[in-house]
Image (tube, grey):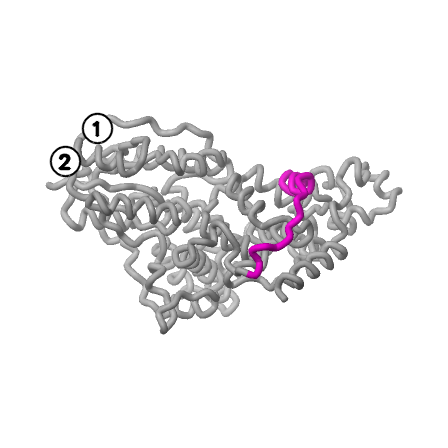
Amino acid sequence: MPLAIWWIRRDLRLHANAALNAALRDGFAPLPLFILDPHLLHNRFTAPQRGGFLSASLHDLAAALEARGAYLLVRRGDPLAVLRQVLAESGATRIYAEEDYTPYARRRDARVARDLPLVHVLGLTVHHPDSVRKPDGTPYTVFTPFSRAWKALPLPSADAGLSIPTPWPPVPRLPGDPLPEMPPPPAFPAGEAAAQARLQEFLAAAVYDYAVARNRLDLDGTSRLSPYLRFGLLSARQVVQAARNALTQAAHPAARRGVETFINELIWREFYHSILYHFPQVVKTAFRPAYRDLPWRTAPEDLRAWQEGRTGYPIVDACMRQLQHEGWMHNRGRMIVASFLVKDLLINWQEGERWFMQHLVDGDIAANNGGWQWAAGTGTDAAPYFRIFNPVLQSRQFDPEGHFIRRWVPELAALPTEYLHAPWQMPLEVQRRFGVRIGHDYPAPLVDHALARARALAVFRRVSG
């Protein structure tokens, strides 16, 4: 049986794996290889939560392969050099890999493909970015028409038909490097089995309330599948197909709306991958040229207060503390804190983008960049510059009883709900009674939201003409 390298990148699973299935379907014995690329190690393993999740998921994959009589070969170094060496040592004649769309990944793969027998397979997204275009062939830059075109395409096979061979076809045992050892994030059990369990749990109930519950910070209404999709512990095709199956089980219109809203969020993921693919410059600058030279404030102390959850706005601080503790943040929270940084503090959105990538378990260039540019009004399908979230109103609407704030800002936990969302409005006697002195036990607000909003509007209006 001829030998091929299964080059694992963002597809840390055995089931419904397009690259692995392609190798098996073409009659090759797959040699699983993961490359510790120095260029990526800085981004992956200096974000402790994400590095821990990746490390634990690799160990899980290695164990699953060992159980089938195979093993995970790990090598450290430049991918082209490593692949060339492994081809020579193993006698493999082909390399199978799932396509990736970041600017670095595309440069890396183009370099490999020029010299080595690389076969790209679609798997990171349901549809290739080149498949979802306008009738004139240009890429979509607005979500709604993109989603209509995306939905009109037939859903590709989820690649679940092939069974994983046990025992694994014989492959040579080559020396490798040890896997990184990092503590996994407590909020996200790693591995393919954990991913599948989380998907099934979500689709069994919570998806039907998703349209409403997904915005509530105090409820467990989101899927929390993003880390598993980020590292390919779940197939995007499988998740979409499973969601469509759930749609047929919806018992009433509200339940249907819940599933349809979830599918829409999956399409947002595809949209941001498409934007990154067609407009790679967004990783370095605003998509909209008019907003590339905004007069951002240089305010390191304000930035640090935002990063550490010390802004004086409880909902902002709760979200930022959750990020540091769990390596994750509710999507509504991401919008609130992004609006606060960019509009209230008038600090460059790229500072927030960078901070998120340093902490998010699900940190993904396409989605993170797309979300930040949406919030800043600088991106493709962006919120207009005059959409500025009022953090107090957001707090009262999406954490009405303050359960989320009380969990992550414990110094405010004893406050009555009427003062929890804007504690600086407490009379002094109330502050003394509950032991929360504003400016001492909890920070005073960094800015007055009304004044900050007016400042942001003036700046954005000048730039937008």
Local crowd size for mark 2, using a 10 Å CA cut-off: few (<14), some (14–19), many (≥20): some
The part of the image, by quadrant, that contains residue 108 is top left
Residue highlighted by disc 2: 91
Where residue 139 sits in the image (x, y, percent)?
40, 65
Left or right, 86 with reference to 212: left
- The magenta span reads 290-308
Task: Check if residue 306 falls in the magenta segment.
Answer: yes
Residue 446 falls left or right of residue 240: right
Three-letter amino acid code at the position of disc 1 = Leu
Residue ID at (86%, 38%): 432
Q: Which mark is residue 114?
A: none
Which quadrant would residue 67 be assigned to in this image? top left
Instruction: Check the image and report above or below for 382 versus 317.
Output: below
- Between 348 and 333, the one lying in front of the other is 348
- Which label number is shown at residue 174? 1
Residue 195 is left or right of residue 440, and the answer is left
- Circle 1: element type: loop
Q: Residue at x 47, y 50 (%)?
A: 283
Q: Is residue 100 above or below residue 385?
A: above
Neighbourhood count class around disc 1 (C-alpha, 10 Å): few under 14, some 14–19, many 20 upward:
few
Give the residue at the far bottom of this rendering: 135
* Magenta region includes residue 401: no
Image location (x, y in percent) of residue 24 = 18, 47
